[in-house]
Amino acid sequence: MSPARRRRIYKWELDAAARTRRVSVWNVWEQITPEWLFIISFLTLIGIGTLGLRVLPFFYADGNPGLGWIDSLFTATSAVCVTGLIVVDTATYFSIWGKLWILLLIQFGGLGMITFTTVLIASLGGRPSLRQEAITAGSREVVPTVDYRGLTRHVILFTLTFEAIGAVVMALVWVPQFGLFAGVGHAVFHSISAFCNAGFSTFSDSVMSFQTWPITLSLLMILIVVGGLGFLTLEELWMNVRARRARRGFRVSLHSKIVLMMTGLLLVGGWIGFAVLEWDNTLDAIPGWARPINALFMSVTPRTAGFNNVDYAEMTTGASFLTILLMFIGGAPGSTAGGLKVTTVALPGLLAWSRIRGQRVTGFLNRTVPEETIQRAVGLIVLGFALVTGSILLIVISEGSPPDRFLDAMFECVSAFDTVGLSRNLTSDLSGFGRLTMVVLMFLGRVGLPTVASALTVAAYRSPGNFRYAQEDVVIG
């Protein structure tokens, strides 16, 4: 073989190898699952938020040094994951630019980067990819009546509408008190923070100064509850209103019915519980006419909102544990709220009720819930409980917490995992390891354990096969 031919063959082999590498990189991108795309989008946003807080000095008020890497990561994660836990006072430590940066992270994190990307592509005339559609659409089998192509647009419409209405009404209340510029700024910040269930506040005492402001508390509660209902439920409620106007029939899905019923049950139950447990404690200094609405606010805010109208470090043990339970349950799937979700907690309860009545299947409102869904709900509760319990153990050991602060450690871990943001004044006392533990909890709580499990389990994308192992029973009880 001549040297020239040998060189041509060698050059062809090099070109072929280069083409193979390009194809391999493209194949890797194409094989990214919706779960990984969702996780990567949040990691990217947290990274950008951390970098901005770390390197941009004008984000901080005069005289305040910039945050270190760990505290910047903690603050960015808390904002993106709409948690609300803070290591410094947001009201005094950050400049107006820093507060706007945090607000931007809250808005993007509350709705999800994928939703924004989809809307941007649609506005430019493009078409969302199948991966983006898989994330924004949810499960068509659960709520088949929803138009999932239009849902993303409605998500933005619902969000901007409620946030705008909340900001305008709140500004009308606050401008006479704080002035035009400050009043509007506080109103916009709190409206977005409330609807996204973030819990960040531009007041050092959160909303404790508004214990006798019923309009402010009521408006914040409405934004929190609506943001925690889930966009699928909001879409169905809107479709139901349109159907009634057109005098057409419309059946609300079992999913939305459970969300609405559980939300009402938890709000009323928490309201009664806090009124009884805290009437002569943290509510004692509040005028009698304002105590009921403050007790209701205490029932609403643990649903992952994170605003506090009382000092949670002064609460009774019973009220603190009730708050932990409400935080652990959280809001609805597909909402800005965190927690295990109301439907996840409701399904095992329905399973137990069905078994008590001797029924072999789990039914509710003349509908049967698939057994696979029940099993996933039980598994999610077990995983969430195990993760939070392990994190509490890590915090207690690493921080050397005295016995009287065990409740604080439990409260903090549940608040972080369920993206609530309420605290018994433990956050600022955590070490670097403790804060990193909270970062992991906030991230896992925001993206969701099922998403992480599906992303990490290769077997989740394989066919289950047509075989099963030999059956063998186990003694329980």
Image (cartoon, helix red, strand yellow):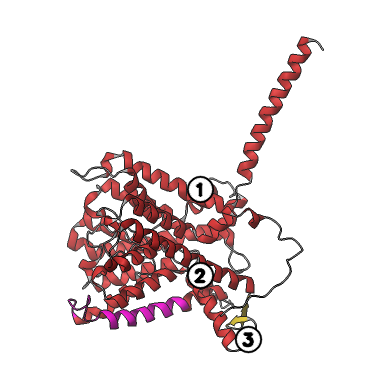
Q: Residue at x 25, y 45 (%)?
A: 60
**How far across and how far down the image is residue 64, in percent?**
21, 45
Decide if residue 380 is on the left or right side of residue 307: right
Residue underneath mark 2: 233
- Visible residue check, residue 167: yes
In magenta segment, residue 358: no
Residue underneath mark 1: 40
Quarter of the view holding residue 213: bottom left
Residue underneath mark 3: 359
Q: Nearer the viewer, mark 2 or mark 1?
A: 1
Q: Residue at x 50, y 63 (%)?
A: 334
Give the answer, above or below, for where 326 lies relative to 390: below
Mark nearer the N terminus (2 vs 1):
1
**How far across and how far down the image is residue 434, in percent?**
35, 54
Give the answer, above or below, for where 126 lies relative to 294: above
Residue stretch rendered in magenta on the structure:
262-287
Which amino acid type is marked by label 3?
A: Gln
Which amino acid type is marked by label 1?
A: Ile
Seen from the viewer's position, the closer of residues 353 and 97 is: 353
Seen from the viewer's position, the closer of residues 313 and 66 is: 313
Residue furthest front in the image: 475
Seen from the viewer's position, the closer of residues 236 and 345 is: 345
Which amino acid type is marked by label 2?
A: Thr
Decide if residue 42 is on the left or right side of residue 293: right
**How far across and how far down the image is residue 26, in percent?**
63, 38
Q: Secondary structure at mark 3?
A: loop
Quarter of the view holding residue 377: bottom right
